[in-house]
Image (cartoon, rainbow, N blue to C red):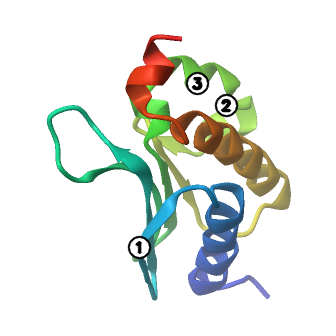
Amino acid sequence: MAESLEQVFSVLRETILRSASVMDVATDEPGNVVLKACWSEPGKKEPAWFGAVQLKKNYVSYHLMPLYALPALLDSVPVDLQKRMQGKSCFNFKKIELDLFEALERLTATCADIYSKPISATLHS
């Protein structure tokens, strides 16, 4: 029997919370978890958006904003995971795929490590 989208969401929610534990949880409600950095973007008062996992009607989306903000990180996205990308920072899943989720966890940890410092420090190092 195929797993439900709620189960896919649950696994991906745990993945982002575990691998980006240095980020602040801004929202954690059924079908939606949002993480933000501990710093604000220049000229903005709100903390920088790090990522999210969201339950949609036909899939679960997994967003990683560091991939958008720092395009060089796209080079570290495995080819199999790239096939799940929609746009520059979103991955969509309809079922649990452990190999891809493990790769996504490693990518998320890399992004969290970079985003644990203000982006201006990252850009100038």
Q: Which mark is residue 77?
A: 2
Q: The residue under label 3 is which amino acid type?
A: Leu
Single out the residue that lies furthest toward the top. Answer: 124
Q: Which mark is residue 56?
A: 1
Q: Specify which label sits upstream in the sequence, 1 or 2.
A: 1
- Horizontal arrangement in the rendering, residue 14 relative to residue 53 (left or right): right
Mark 1–mark 3 distance (CA, rounded to whole Å): 26 Å
Q: Is residue 22 above or below residue 74?
A: below
Please give the name of the residue rendered at 81% of the width and 53% of the height, measured from the top-left corner.
102
User: Which structural element holds mark 3?
Assistant: helix
Please give the name of the residue rendered at 43% of the width and 34% of the height, measured from the top-left corner.
118
Closer to the eye: label 1 or 2:
2
Q: Is residue 39 above or below residue 27?
A: above
Q: Is residue 5 above or below residue 91?
A: below
Q: Specify which label sits upstream in the sequence, 1 or 3.
A: 1
Q: The residue under label 1 is which amino acid type?
A: Lys
**For residue 94, what is the image quadrant?**
bottom right
Residue contact at pointers 3 and 2, CB within 8 angstroms = yes
Report crowding for label 3: few under 14, some 14 to 19, many 20 or more residues within 10 A (C-alpha).
some
| Image x and y of residue 86, in percent | 45, 43
Mark 1–mark 2 distance (CA, rounded to whole Å): 23 Å
Disc 3 target residue: 73
- In the foreground, 10 or 24: 24
- In the foreground, 11 or 84: 11
User: Which structural element holds mark 1?
Assistant: loop
Mark 3–mark 2 distance (CA, rounded to whole Å): 7 Å
Residue contact at pointers 1 and 2, CB within 8 angstroms = no
